[in-house]
Amino acid sequence: MSVDLSAQIANMSVKNLFLNASGIHCQTEQELDELMNEPVSGAMVTKSMTPKSRFGNPLPRYYRLANGSINSMGLPNQGFDYYMDYLKNHDQKKPIIVSVAGMSKEEDLEMLHQLQDNDDYQGLTELNLSCPNVIGKPQMAYDFEAADDLLHEVFSFYKKPLGIKLPPYFDLVHFDMIAEVLNKYPLSHVNTINSVGNGLWIDTNSETVVLKPKGGFGGVGGSMVLPTALANVRGLRQRLNDDIKIIGTGGVTNGRDAFAHILCGAEMVSIGTQLYEEGLQTFERVTRELTDIMEAKGYTSLGDFRGKLKVIED
Ligand code: SIN
């Protein structure tokens, strides 16, 4: 039996639902080329870009944990023009989502205006409102009013497919509040979750934090955040308009984790920490594992089980 792993978000159709999480293997031309030539994943997303290139936070800024990772990268990227040149000058064997993360509302608007005016670019853009690691810059998606104001301004001129990268929410009231904001706008998708912001890990031998920036505070990812990621995919899928698709991100290390994201309602699934640690062959393995699960259950397409999570009745 063969299974269909295709998915669709706005004008982007993919044969395989997997992509990298933004920040993983997508900063430089070489990394982007390697992702582009990776034969299994269906799409890719750039590192979140700022108008000008940034080195990001001081090192060390990534640390592997037993069941995940903690990072405080601080949006290192080559700058908006670098990625626009990449899009212009490279054959797109798979769709590229452009991730933008300005240091201010003005920078977000500046990049989105340029994308709107760029006739060569008709693909998906993702506005990252959730990076926890830029010193002095709060995660805007935790400020519902500010996010609403920004989206109101964005959609007054932005007419191409646009999604948002969200931080994790931890209270069902906050799911209600962000969904109420997002449902006002013609978003192509939300990508949930970014890392769980401002965790802390300590090397108890040296009695020292493991990251240099922000006194050691950083975003937590990897398998330990899977329950939070599933809750956010599920909680938002239950609340968002049907035409706002969800990219499930967070805690995916194998096909079973991806299957769970889809059961919660994910259209596509992105992989972060595991991809960083294992390399690009992750996509082939996780795809094979997901396919095996689907075949064993008699499912032939993602739609057979997407969003069909069961709850325990009385
Ligand atoms: C970073 O560059 O600090 C991570 C990106 C993000 O969390 O959005």
Image: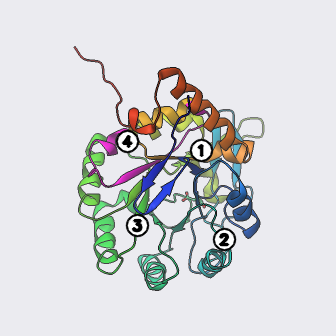
Asked which quadrant contains residue 10, the reply is: bottom left
Of tags 3 and 4, the one toward the viewer is 3
Question: Residue 227's spot in the image, x, y percent?
Answer: 47, 33
Instruction: Say which label, 1 or 3, has the lower sequence index.
Output: 3
Residue 227: assigned label: none
Measured in 3D between alpha carbons, the distance from the residue under mark 2 to the one under mark 1, in whole angstroms, is 41 Å
Measured in 3D between alpha carbons, the distance from the residue under mark 3 to the one under mark 4, in whole angstroms, is 25 Å
Q: Amino acid at mark 2?
A: Asp
Q: Amino acid at mark 4?
A: Phe
How many residues crowd mark 3 within 10 Å: few (<14), some (14–19), many (20+)? many
Residue in view at x 34 percent, y 31 percent:
308
Instruction: Say which label, 2 or 3, has the lower sequence index.
Output: 2
Q: Which residues are magenta?
A: 233-255
Measured in 3D between alpha carbons, the distance from the residue under mark 4 to the one under mark 2, in whole angstroms, is 41 Å
Measured in 3D between alpha carbons, the distance from the residue under mark 1 to the one under mark 3, in whole angstroms, is 33 Å
Of tags 2 and 1, the one toward the viewer is 2
**Which residue is disc 2 drawn over?**
91
Tell me if 44 is positioned left or right of 311 in this view. Answer: right
Residue 170: assigned label: 4
Q: Amino acid at mark 1?
A: Leu
How did the renderer colour the structure?
rainbow
